[in-house]
Image (spheres, rainbow, N blue to C red):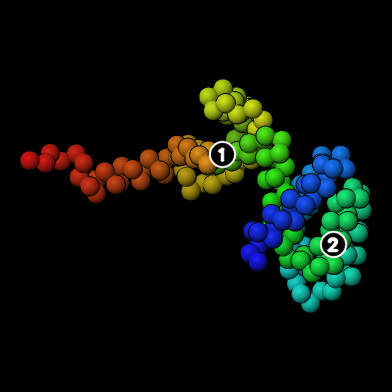
Amino acid sequence: MSAYRLASRYAKSLLDLAVEKNALDAVFNDITYFKSVLKKAPEFRSVLRNPEINTSKKQQIFDKLFDAFHPISKAFFEIVLRKRRSAYLPEFATSFIELYHAFNHITAVTLTTAVEPDDQTIQHVKTVLQQKAGLDKIVLESKVDPAIIGGYILQFADKMIDASVIRKLEIIDDQFINNDYVKKI
């Protein structure tokens, strides 16, 4: 079974249980925290993927790191570890967050800029998206990529707005290659 299908099944089960037990926000907070730990500590991801570390040792690590988690989240992690699917936990977390956003009609937006945007810029982007694109609830993630030189790249749902300097330079380059400015007789 592919990692995507496996992740979506586990995430859907966790979402359904959390909704049923009226603990969706608590479980979402736990999974979000878990994902942030994965991002900040790549060695933790290595532990999850390492088949030589036995399940009981991984369970001890989880018990110490995530002691304050909601019982549903703890039980979920315990089941995943017991079934030896810990290598897929990053995908499970990503899939759960996507399902949570869909369940609550939240649009995830990624803003890529050449330099770190300030709070005023982020708020302006949110306001424009709410007014022009009709998005109600927005979770904006900001990324910095100096390779785009300037401008921004905005991604949400199935849309991408590329207003970066590098893209505009690529367009000009293509026009020169195609000789769009030479009269053809």
Using a 10 Å C-alpha cutoff, classify the residue at mark 2 as few (fewer than 14 neighbours), some (14 to 19) or many (20 or more).
few
Taking the spot 26% from the left edge, 43% from the top edge, the residue there is: 175
Spot the residue most to the top: 131
Pick the front one: 15 or 66: 15
What number of labels is visible?
A: 2
Mark carried by residue 156: 1
Spot the residue most to the bottom: 52
Using a 10 Å C-alpha cutoff, classify the residue at mark 1 as few (fewer than 14 neighbours), some (14 to 19) or many (20 or more).
some
Q: Quadrant of residue 76?
A: bottom right
Q: CA distance from mark 2 to mark 1?
A: 33 Å
Q: Which residue is mark 2?
A: 79
| Amino acid type for the residue under numbered disc 2 | Ile
Left or right of residue 43: residue 154:
left
Determine if residue 153 is in view: no
| Residue 85: percent from left, percent from top | 76, 66
SS type, badge 1: strand
Determine if residue 170 is in view: yes
Give the quarter of the figure containing the C terminus: top left
Vertical placement of 43 versus 158: above or below? below
Taking the spot 85% from the left edge, 70% from the top edge, the residue there is: 55
